[in-house]
Amino acid sequence: MSELEEPLLITIGQITTAQGVHGEVRVLPLTDFPHRFSQLKEVTVVLREKVSKYRVLSARRHQRFVVLKLEGVNDPEQARQLRNALLKIPQEQLMPLPPGHYYIFQLVGLAVYTVEGNYVGKIEDIFRTGSNDVYQVRREDGKELLLPAIRQVVEKIDLEAGQIIIRPLAGLLDE
């Protein structure tokens, strides 16, 4: 595989270091579903523009990490060469979410409109704060708007239409 088709591959973890003497890698999960690693049969590894596919031979939890054994990575030196690599899977392998919940990649790039139909901007990023997410919206004038992702504000998310409808709280859209 020579070109990474970014929209089709979703990051689920990052290799942090080698683990043990048999070429295992320690992975920091970047997913809300760390148990998914035990179900992986194959993973795409992306490191400095190089894209490789590996069969996953085993996966186990170790503290807050997951330890993976990848086919062809047989010693600590080979494992260390994968340090900082991102682990990606095809979008079709994502865990299903309950209704009303979305993956970040599904929301980034959506247009934001008020319930009156006024264009606000596009979602550029999403910050996870613990109590609620915050949508970073880039306005047409280039300014940034931080929009709380709460029911009182987000009226509707329509992935097919590529838009989010909001009911802004008083003062939220003031310059």
Image (cartoon, rainbow, N blue to C red):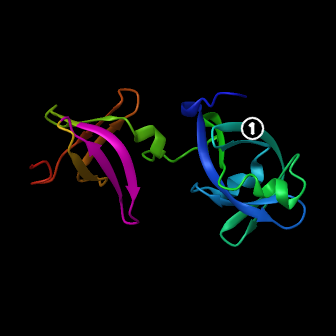
Residue 161, magenta (yes or no): no
Question: To which residue does mark 1 refer?
Answer: 52
Residue 127, magenta (yes or no): yes
Residue at the image point whose x is 90% and y is 61% from the top: 22
The quadrant of the picture occupied by the N terminus is top right
Q: Does 174 sit left or right of 155 as displayed? A: left
Residue 155 coordinates in the image, percent (x, y): 26, 43
Residue at the image point whose x is 31% and y is 53% from the top: 149
Residue at the image point whose x is 53% and y is 46% from the top: 97
Q: Main secondary structure of the magenta part?
A: strand
Segment colored magenta: 121-140
Number of on-image labels: 1
Q: Residues within 10 Å of mark 1 (few under 14, many from 20)?
A: some
Amino acid type for the residue under numbered disc 1: Ser
Q: Nearer the viewer, residue 47 or 35?
A: 47
What secondary structure is marked by label 1? strand
